[in-house]
Image (cartoon, grey):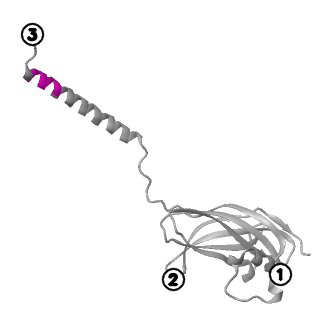
Amino acid sequence: MKPTLKQVGAGVGASVGVLASLVGVLSYIDDKRKDPPPPDRKSPPEIQRITLHDSAEPLGDYLRKNPSRKKKRSYTPAELRRRGYSFLLDVRAEGPVGRRLRLRFRLRVEDGDPVPGADYDQIVSDFTTSSPDQEAEVPAWVPDPIEPGRYVVRFTFERLDGKGQVVGFESEKDSRPFEHAPS
């Protein structure tokens, strides 16, 4: 007995229905297995690595090697001869474009007390993020402390508002301790 056209149509329709249900179930399972889309990331910027490049480097030599670090002021010959430590920082920032950040250093004795004086608490650089995920190498020069001893440099990211005022703390990292013996 041959199936009628009506029976063939019903069979094809049922097969299509079963296949559509199967595809729907498999799609649902696949969606549940996939990681959800990442949220709009705004993790704190991080200092990934701090490398001490040079000790006893005169500020004038550092500025010649890193012209972008020269501040908008002139230096006296004595300031340009002042010796210090040269660091290179690998930094990373994730988050919205246009985020304003400040990188600052504070020289500290190894036990954590800050070294007094404005020379030992300075801005390294201000940044405005230009992509959602960016990395950079940032040079920094820290003047020699006056006293001999063991020191660390604490580098800190601060969050800035639209006027350039600090409105929050983001992250920080200390250099490895180093021994300073005045020459």
Q: Secondary structure at mark 1?
A: loop
Q: Position of residue 80 (x, y in %)?
A: 80, 83
Q: Secondary structure at mark 2?
A: loop
User: Residue at horizontal 51%, vertical 71%?
Assistant: 99
Q: Residues under labels 1 and 2: Cα distance? A: 32 Å
User: Residue at horizontal 41%, vertical 51%?
Assistant: 37
| Farthest-out residue, right | 183
Which numbered disc, 1 or 3, marks the residue that appears first in the sequence? 3
Q: Quadrant of residue 160?
A: bottom right
Choose between 132 and 50: the one closer to the eye: 132
Q: Check disc 3: other Cα within 10 Å, few if <14, some if 14-19, many if 20+.
A: few
**Would residue 10 be counted in the magenta stretch?**
yes
Magenta segment boundaries in residue numbering: 6-12
Left or right of 176 on screen, residue 3: left
Q: Position of residue 50 (x, y in %)?
A: 71, 63
Report if the CB atoms under discs 1 and 3 are less than 8 Å apart: no
Left or right of 125 on screen, residue 152: right
Query: Which residue does the numbered mark 2 point to in the structure image?
Result: 163
Query: Which residue does the numbered mark 1 point to in the structure image?
Result: 82
User: Residue at horizontal 41%, vertical 48%?
Assistant: 36
Task: Find residue 1 and name its label.
Answer: 3
Choose between 45 and 54: the one closer to the eye: 54
User: Residue at horizontal 84%, vertical 78%?
Assistant: 146
Please say if 128 is above or below 90.
below
* Residue type at tag 1: Arg
Q: Residues under labels 3 and 2: Cα distance? A: 87 Å
* Residue type at tag 3: Met
Please say if 39 is above or below 27.
below
